[in-house]
Image (cartoon, coloured by chain):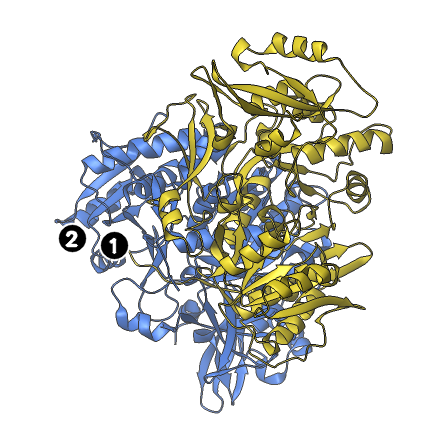
Chain colours: A blue, B yellow
């Protein structure tokens, strides 16, 4: 068995050669072709080289979704430097901790984050900084000269493309190593499952600093398809883009989709999307059944998916032809991925709940500079995700919950997602979050937090009656709290650990 | 830079899990789903194991296109054994030479080739043989027991899948090593270029013992699409299959396509194919312009391609959107492929003719047991194809000729394909072949052989007048011979070296 490094021609450059005029990326009124994006990335790479960026350097980026972000991603690829995109919603202390932890050799930020960058400079005066700006039609480093260096025409698949800190619903954040190989195999696995059409346009409204957003940028140049970018998620502009920009695929999480449907009913008389929209890729956690049924009624082509940073986004995805037959399932592993459910070190039988484990070339080989965490999470190539689920008889994955969210009550396992799904099926409830509360008698009991649709309401008694109708006694929330907002991370994922902060004082 | 072996779940098994009921392969009246094909291959693998086939063995197959061939390909994959498909048109001596050369540990043949196998047994009495048959609905080894062995659930991309002897238009035949990696990257490169649709049906009418046919079988299970198989090429059944079996893609060479069009005019009043046919992949040598123009008039979606055994079929393919803009070009390299034109050890400028060189994970790493031939053909990963061509200003490849066919006349390079194209543009000429003839004055001069359409004719004088109109004097054939048939190999490729045998005696 011999192996050898696989080198591929730079993906963006190939697109610029194959389809120079084709739309690569659109933000607002600005449309860049692949040739233009390649030119911008090349120019920026020369400026970054002049600023001292070298192959293998870890370069942190603090920037909003935009043309600057996209150009920067490709400029670093041309230099062989490693992208460390920072979550723009972190506190100053969290940002500084992460910059030190990853040993960033430079912090690049956009104009919007100038103030934060200045604060960072006071705490980390040694760290080089540079400002990225969109100057007229040009992405440039502020006042940056260019240096003529030889850019990398080839991509070594085994090299690290990015380090992404996990959103950290359990333990300390860790930097996940994302290689080019992972991006490649993920993009191909996705194309084989969802089909590949030359006129595809992928709407990106998730932050590019999360894997869900970043992987769209890479998929665009691997598959040669267009990206419609939005600075952030907002239901109305998203719906407008789907209507007028011929979007074919969109990646969302459940809460986004729910807001989109609510807005859609106000925007469109028939409450439907145009037929150009061929795939709504729904990730970020178990999807509530009522939402899926609502989409089915509107003929919205929902494709459920399960993935995490460590799997470079999608790892398991429901094929479109199974969407209705397997409602609620995350589907089957993408072609490069092996999947198994482990229960107490044994491979679980069909229907038996256990921990979801993944292996394959789109799965990370570890965490940056953390051999112990890597060894704990990955054994013989198998990544233990910590998430719970089971496979049905046909090998379709049903994700139950994140293990850290598991509530154990009187020896029974209680899965918050199941309770939330029932709560959301109530006509007045837009969002719901469930967590465990310590209880003398049962160990833990579930409690719930719900947010009403605007203009709708219900009494606590009605809500309890509703859940009693659907759930076994031990799964019924002990208390239901009505709140204005649920805690979510920037990708829209519910942070169940933070639900406790909503509890009334005392 | 670290590399590691990439293991993927068996492709056929994945298809059987993902889409068990979907059509995998059709031959005549028989349709097998992916689940059925997987079952047949598994059973056959157990029989082959009982017959002594082990991982890494080189197993020769002498069989016609059919369900037996397809099952056998996948059975060997499950055993990790190497397929050596034999060209069924070889003479007995050629077959025996190849079996010895490749050190085959077993010869498996179908019922149709029983007599040939018996003759081989007399010449090579030591060589194990087994008979493959379609018994009712079961592909089996004749009288073969089954042995319960653990089949390989994973495919190691670096392993050798097959050894294919090149059709040998120059020098002695050599066995090209075809790895799983080559098949994988070729299938993905093809899907990214031609799009990937879940309902694709690829018509396979080329011999499976050539790379053009074999790669369709692998592409089917990598991409999860259906194959409509035919035992051999025959224009009328091919046209019928396109009409009634919803074929979306077909692989052909120019002479096949020409015959298909002639038959189509008799079969269909409007001389057109249904719109389900989205891609006619045209390979096997430079395509004559009149044929391409004929197809353009009928809205037939021709996609020209250039490839060879060493590149696991397609290496360079014209994208559908460029089909008319770049008529006559083989297109641009597929995503995994690097392409350059070398002229006297220098990279040729745009428009400058040279030797086509290829590199990338879909290109072979060498010839079986021939380190010297490998070293001569492949340097630093770059394969020298020996074929001539040039790139235009936009990097599109134009294939001029196979180097060995080059005619040098009075110091001028003369490319037979160019002359043939002109001859075929004459209304009476269906096929044309050109080669060089030794000449006292000029070194070589071109001579031509032409075959008329049935019912059409022209005088030799008219033909000379036709070429004088289109070609510089030194390119005009000295003599034009009218013949009944041109020499072609089993893939339909014109064998220019054998044109001499058509010369009148004396």
Q: Residue at x 69, y 13 (%)?
A: B463
Residue B64 shown left or right of residue B380 in the figure: right
Q: Is residue A55 visible?
A: yes
Q: Nearer the viewer, residue B197 or B125?
A: B125
Residue B429 shown left or right of residue B339 in the figure: right
What residue occupies the far bottom of the structure in this picture?
Answer: A441
Disc 1: which residue: A92
Contact (CB < 8 A) between labels 1 and 2? Answer: yes
Rounded to the nearest whole Å, what is the CA distance between mark 1 and mark 2?
Answer: 9 Å
Q: Residue at x 74, y 17 (%)?
A: B427
**Occupied quadrant, residue A198:** top right
Q: Residue at x 47, y 46 (%)?
A: A219
Both labels 1 and 2 in a single chain: yes
Q: Chain of mark 2?
A: A
Q: Nearer the viewer, residue B117 or A394?
A: B117
Disc 2: which residue: A123
């Amino acid at each position: 068995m011999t192996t050898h490094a696989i080198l591929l021609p730079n993906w963006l450059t190939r697109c610029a050669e194959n389809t120079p005029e084709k739309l690569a990326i659109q933000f607002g009124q600005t449309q860049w072709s692949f040739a233009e994006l390649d030119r911008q990335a090349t120019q920026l790479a020369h400026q970054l080289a002049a600023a001292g960026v070298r192959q293998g350097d870890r370069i942190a980026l603090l920037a909003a979704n935009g043309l600057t972000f996209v150009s920067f991603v490709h400029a670093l690829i041309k230099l062989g430097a490693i992208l460390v995109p920072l979550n723009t919603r972190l506190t100053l202390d969290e940002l500084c901790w992460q910059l030190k932890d990853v040993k960033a050799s430079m912090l690049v930020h956009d104009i919007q984050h100038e103030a934060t960058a200045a604060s960072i400079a006071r705490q980390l005066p040694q760290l080089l900084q540079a400002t990225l700006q969109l100057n007229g039609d040009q992405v440039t480093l502020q006042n940056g000269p260019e240096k003529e260096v030889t850019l990398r025409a080839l991509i070594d698949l085994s090299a690290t493309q990015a380090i992404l800190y996990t959103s950290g619903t359990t333990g300390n954040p860790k930097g996940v190593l994302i290689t080019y190989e992972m991006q490649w195999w993920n993009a191909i696995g996705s194309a084989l499952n969802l089909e590949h059409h030359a006129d595809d346009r992928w709407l990106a409204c998730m932050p590019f600093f999360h894997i869900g957003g970043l992987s769209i940028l890479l998929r665009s140049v691997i598959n040669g398809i267009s990206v419609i970018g939005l600075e952030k998620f907002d239901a109305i502009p998203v719906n407008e883009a789907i209507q007028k920009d011929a979007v074919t695929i969109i990646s969302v999480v459940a809460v986004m989709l729910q807001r989109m449907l609510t807005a859609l009913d106000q925007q469109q008389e028939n409450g439907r999307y145009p037929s150009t929209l061929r795939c709504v890729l729904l990730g970020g956690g178990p999807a509530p059944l009522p939402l899926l049924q609502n989409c089915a009624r509107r003929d919205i082509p929902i494709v459920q998916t399960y993935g995490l940073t460590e799997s470079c986004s999608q790892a398991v995805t429901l094929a479109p032809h199974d969407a209705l037959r397997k409602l609620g399932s995350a589907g089957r592993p993408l072609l490069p991925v092996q999947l198994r459910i482990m229960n107490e070190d044994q491979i679980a039988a069909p229907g038996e709940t256990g921990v979801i484990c993944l292996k394959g070339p789109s799965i990370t080989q570890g965490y940056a500079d953390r051999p112990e965490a890597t060894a704990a999470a990955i054994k013989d190539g198998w990544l233990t995700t910590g998430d719970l689920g089971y496979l049905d008889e046909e090998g379709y994955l049903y994700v139950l919950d994140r293990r850290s969210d598991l509530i154990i009550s009187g020896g029974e396992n209680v899965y918050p997602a199941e309770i939330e799904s029932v709560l959301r099926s109530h006509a007045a409830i837009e969002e719901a979050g469930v967590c465990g509360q310590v209880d003398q008698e049962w160990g833990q009991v579930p409690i719930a937090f719900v947010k009403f649709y605007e203009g709708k309401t219900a009494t606590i008694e009605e809500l309890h009656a509703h859940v009693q109708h659907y759930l076994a006694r031990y799964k019924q929330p002990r208390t239901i709290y009505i709140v204005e907002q649920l805690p979510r991370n920037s990708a829209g994922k519910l942070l169940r650990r933070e639900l406790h902060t909503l509890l009334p004082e005392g």
